[in-house]
Image: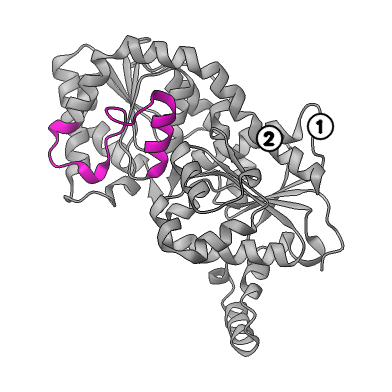
Amino acid sequence: MSTRKNGVAFYMHAGSGNHGCEAIVDSLLRMTAQGEGALSEIRLISCRPQEDLTYVPGTLAEVLPERRMEDHPVWHVLYYAYRRLTGDEDSFARFRLREIAGNRAPRLAVSIGGDNYCYPILLKELMLANRMLNRQGTATMLLGCSIEPSLLEEHPEVREDMMRYRRIIARESITYEALRAAGIPPERLVLCPDPAFALPVQERPLPQEWEEGNTVGINVSPMVTGYEEQEGVTMRSYEALMEHILSDTSLRIALIPHVVWSSNDDRGPLRQLYEKYRETGRVCLIGDAPAEVLKGYISRCRFFVGARTHATIAAYSSGVPTLVVGYSVKARGIARDLFGTEENYVLPVQSLREPGQLIEGFEWLRAHEQEIRDRLTACMPSYREKALLNGEEIRKLYREL
């Protein structure tokens, strides 16, 4: 058992080179480490701590590394042998989360990778970490989550894992209702917008190709192409959309990345698009920057078409009419909560059959521009206020422990 039991730790954080992850961390640290009732001892356990030291502002948290077995081959063999001999599966989680295990245990550990449960490859790690932390006496919270209802319906071990969390904050209503249906006690369950809805904006000078008030922001990711059912249809659709914008409208185009990991870098497909249309003089490629700066560019777009969830959250929260090229429950749920429906607001990449679909979706957005803008202008102040409840829920649970 731990002897420490102080402070809060954020874990299951992949690193701030994914600026969606950065937006969550940045927002949460402002909510919990500043102002009245601020928590004084916060640790951020990160897969890529150097990225967080680069992008996350200030010294609001102690940034500590998550250890990866693949980086320590000798320890990997030893731990594997130990687990085979003892049956102690928690040993892998203790190794990985050494900075919050044993005598380093915090009072509260908050799992902040909002869509981690959408990826089968992460499920075992998530469940092992949650169980290990509970066994050592650390209370756990799952924050800003999106979970496919079918996962809860078909996998009793995931439902059992959900029961270990002292509090679960669902960021959209599809997940919230699925968790209720799965039997999560109502007193442990909260519906609250993603914390990144409260992320501040930092503006920088615009490129010369950008026309204020008349530029379409476009984001595409290598990840989204992995969900397409017809190979290559996503990039063909984006090319067709750009050709349509350049030939049939006076709009300019800004290509905006939101993840810059070498294994999953938006700048790859965006540069392909840029090189194809740069000679028009109406297309610019935005470089890497912190989440607040990227939100600054997105906030100055007239329209936004995006694949990355937190790029679209930056657009929504800035009142920009947005079409999401989505692939999971998170896109559907967020749009449904904002507009009452995901129809016309989310184009599932799995449904793409021919490039004209993206053009049709964009033209619907243009035709309803003022209606959408009015809707976002009306609802977003209260939505941002509700997002601040993420920090209050963390402080509230911490005080209860």
Tell me where residue 362 appears, x and y as whole percent: 23, 24
Q: Amino acid at mark 2?
A: Gly
Instruction: Answer whether residue 308 is visible to the viewer in this image.
Output: no
Q: Is residue 63 left or right of residue 359?
A: right
Q: Is residue 339 left or right of residue 279?
A: right
Please state the extent of the stretch shown in magenta in the rendering: 329-357
Q: Are marks 1 and 2 in contact (CB under 8 Å)?
A: no
- Label disc, if present, on residue 37 of the rendered structure: 1
Q: Is residue 109 left or right of residue 19?
A: right
- Label disc, if present, on residue 391 of the rendered structure: 2
Q: Is residue 15 magenta?
A: no
Residue closest to the far bottom: 85
Q: Is residue 52 above or below residue 88?
A: above
* Residue drawn where x is 16% and y is 32% of the image: 357
| Residue 374 falls in image quadrant | top left
Q: Is residue 1 above or below residue 111?
A: below
| Residue 23 falls in image quadrant | top right
